[in-house]
Image: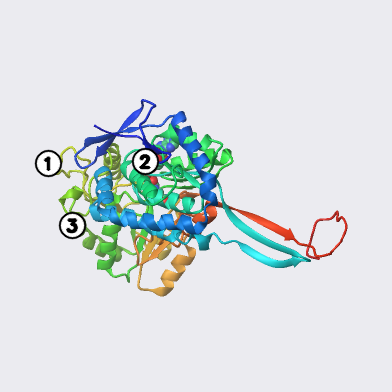
Amino acid sequence: MKQIGHFIGGEHVAGKSGRTTDVFNPATGEVEAQLAMADGSELSAAIENAKAAQPAWGATNPQKRARVMMKFVELLNRDMDKLAEALSREHGKTIPDAKGDVIRGLEVAEFCIGAPHLLKGEFTEGVGPGIDIHSVRQPLGVVAGITPFNFPAMIPMWKFCPAIACGNAFVLKPSERDPSVPIMLAELMIEAGLPAGILNVVNGDKEAVDGLLDHPDVMAVGFVGSTPIAEYVYARGCANGKRVQCFGGAKNHMIVMPDADMDQAADALVGAGYGAAGERCMAVSVAVPVGEDTADRLVEKLVPRVESLKIAPSTAGDDVDFGPLVTKDAYARVKGYIDKGVEEGADLVVDGRGFSMQGYEDGFFIGASLFDKVTRDMTIYKEEIFGPVLSIARAANYEEGIDLAMSHEYGNGVAIFTRDGDTARDFTSRINVGMVGVNVPIPVPIAYYTFGGWKRSGFGDLNQHGPDAFRFYTRTKTITSRWPSGIKEGADFSIPTMN
Ligand code: NAD
């Protein structure tokens, strides 16, 4: 059986705690590997390595740090097929989607090549007699990232690329469900020229997370995962005086106006609702057609599309629409939600529960499900399902549609499909959601903008990637200098002002 340990100080390190967890191939249901779960001493070793390596890295000029990112991008491209294959084997997503996972991270690495420019400070000459002022952005020291299973390449890179480009050392605690790719990424960073100890990967569960949150040498923590854990990490990290940003769950609505192109809207919903088996924080999980006629037309377009989706292991070819769910628990949770939706009176138009694949009976596959006439009091509307289940919540008019999205506790992504500029403009201005699409179902901002949800989808005041990442992983120092040329003023006991 393959054993996966940690990556500390530039080397593979076997787990010592004696605790392990199984890593599955979700398509076959078979155990692929045993993953070590770190204890406090293993975590401390990683933090100590990072702390020892960081000062020299922080003092390395930003151009040289950027060159490591440049080489890393080249290596990601070289190993794209290998990374996608490993990712898909543990996660279950299709190969093209797995490549997308890597590429979305790679794009942030590309953005980080701009570190020398992004880290420039400010300077004002002559703020007083002989006095200049300037500010610099300095790294924090050792920082940590805790990441979810659903993007095992992209989200670790969203965290460690900017942190490292800023001159920090990083400890990554990736998801225990698909741990191979994060370690492969760390190996590539070393091959790209990163000094040992600057990027460490420690595998584990709550024990490792708590260790990071409580360790005095960890200066900042970036988390992505479900909302209850995001809230916990935020509260505990902040209570320990750390800089913390946490991104949580989602329930993304897509409003379909009567004037929308219904084929385009249905295609968008099928891709955004069922891609990656719905295991995306930017998946559309609620379609909101405005008006009964729009709803009827949309359902008519959706049903044949949903029924004909190709569900198979990623090894079945590039035309697979989506693969299995990540674990048996995820399968049971999603099936439980579908049962609950039926029980609470929603109209199950397409039922994915009976799906089975010959030769893969033990895999964690579930078919695509479509609910119509879902209302705001239902559990399947209120909670994140994180599976291939799309709910249609009919709205009588635009105001009711926008109110649905605005009243929901989550505020990660949202979209509107319309051909009317006035409606789109009103929508983008009023909606209380962090990432908004107009005729774009998955409005994931590109690398040089920032990514983050509102309401219970995001905690902390800076977003991921883009310029915010450079603010999050640095602190500003402001220096006032005086070079008096013969000015003698004597002691001054009042606060300096510009008067
Ligand atoms: P999760 O919350 O179960 O796990 C996330 C991380 O937290 C993992 O590293 C895990 O080991 C750790 N963890 C789990 N339980 C813990 C506990 N009790 N104490 C401390 N740490 C714990 O999330 P997941 O199932 O891996 O990922 C899916 C979730 O992530 C969904 O809710 C999805 O919406 C969300 N997500 C959000 C974004 C975003 O940017 N907002 C992006 C991707 C995924």
Residue beneath disc 2: 175
Pinpoint residue 160: horizontal percent, then vertical percent.
Answer: 44, 49
Q: Amino acid at mark 1?
A: Gly
Q: Tell me if 147 is positioned left or right of 267 in this view.
A: right
266 shown above or below 209: below
Instruction: Give the mark nearest the N terminus, 3 or 2.
Output: 2
Ligand 1 picture quarter: top left
Q: CA distance from mark 3 to mark 2?
A: 28 Å
Neighbours of disc 2 within 10 Å: few (<14), some (14-19), many (20+): many
Most foreground residue, 43 or 228? 43
Q: Amino acid at mark 3?
A: Asp
Pinpoint residue 256: horizontal percent, then vertical percent.
Answer: 34, 64
Q: Which mark, by number, is residue 359?
A: 1
Most foreground residue, 21 or 140? 140
Q: Amino acid at mark 2?
A: Ser
Give the secondary structure at mark 1: loop
Instruction: Give the mark nearest the N terminus, 1 or 3.
Output: 3
Q: Residue at x 48, y 64 (%)?
A: 430
Q: Residue at x 15, y 41 (%)?
A: 360
Neighbours of disc 3 within 10 Å: few (<14), some (14-19), many (20+): some
Give the secondary structure at mark 3: loop
Pinpoint residue 480: horizontal percent, then vertical percent.
Answer: 71, 58
Q: Tell me if 102 is positioned left or right of 139 in this view.
A: left
Q: Quadrant of the C terminus?
A: bottom right
